[in-house]
Image (spheres, helix red, strand yellow):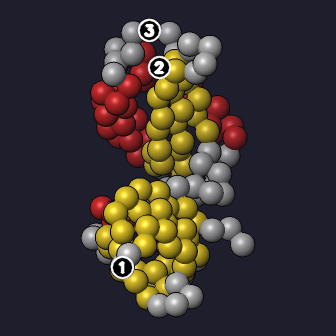
Amino acid sequence: MFQDILLKLRSIFASYLEKGGYVLVDMRFYRAQSGASILEVLADRAEGDIRLDECVRLNRELGAVMDASGVILDRYTLDVSSPGMDRPLVTVSDFKRVLGKPARFFLGEAVEERIEYEGVIVGVNDLEVTVQTKQKTIQIPLDKINKAKQVIV
């Protein structure tokens, strides 16, 4: 159920945010221990550094967009926030934004017999990310990445 809702809302929110110069970084919809439904939305400016007042405004705006969509009929809590310094790297543009910076990768399928890598992103294209580790340069296919984050040093 939650996955179906996320699929519908992801395109609605991404389109809305894009018109305002923002990007949808990630979304999560779950039921808290209290039983309340929580929709978490991570948004950022296209160039990064979204401010708190922008998150507050986007929370109101996306709440109205969601209510108008009729996708969720039950009560829910909407939480729009910044992805923070450890923003997940998901899209090609995310990886291009941190080109030349260190990142950590957790893979769903092994690449050269490993499922975890850390190194500097030295190249990006539509299919893979090139990473310079301490040992060697490796190409990691985007479709094998479960999770990736910039390493803040």
Q: Which residue is painted at 49% across and 26% down in the image?
A: 30
In the rendered image, which residue does mark 2 sit on? Answer: 64
Left/right of residue 73 with respect to residue 134 in the rendered view: left
The reply to whether the C-beta atoms of the residues labelled 2 and 1 are less than 8 Å apart is no
Tell me if residue 117 comes above or below residue 56 in the rendering. Answer: below
Task: Say which element carries label 1.
Answer: loop
Q: Amino acid at mark 1?
A: Glu
Tell me if residue 103 comes above or below residue 3 in the rendering. Answer: below
Instruction: Give coordinates of residue 116: x percent, y percent.
Output: 49, 68
Task: Say which element carries label 3.
Answer: loop
Q: Residue furthest left?
A: 127
In the rendered image, which residue does mark 3 sit on? Answer: 74
Q: Which residue is painted at 34% across and 30% down in the image?
A: 3
Instruction: Give coordinates of residue 72: x percent, y percent.
Output: 39, 16
Pick whichever of labels 3 and 1 is earlier in the sequence.
3
Pick whichever of labels 2 and 3 is earlier in the sequence.
2
Q: Amino acid at mark 3?
A: Asp
In the rendered image, which residue does mark 1 sit on? Answer: 112
Instruction: Give coordinates of residue 107: x percent, y percent.
Output: 41, 63
Instruction: Give coordinates of residue 113: x percent, y percent.
Output: 38, 75
Calculate the distance from the C-alpha at mark 2 to the C-alpha at mark 1: 47 Å
Calculate the distance from the C-alpha at mark 2 to the C-alpha at mark 3: 15 Å
Left/right of residue 125 with respect to residue 89 in the rendered view: left
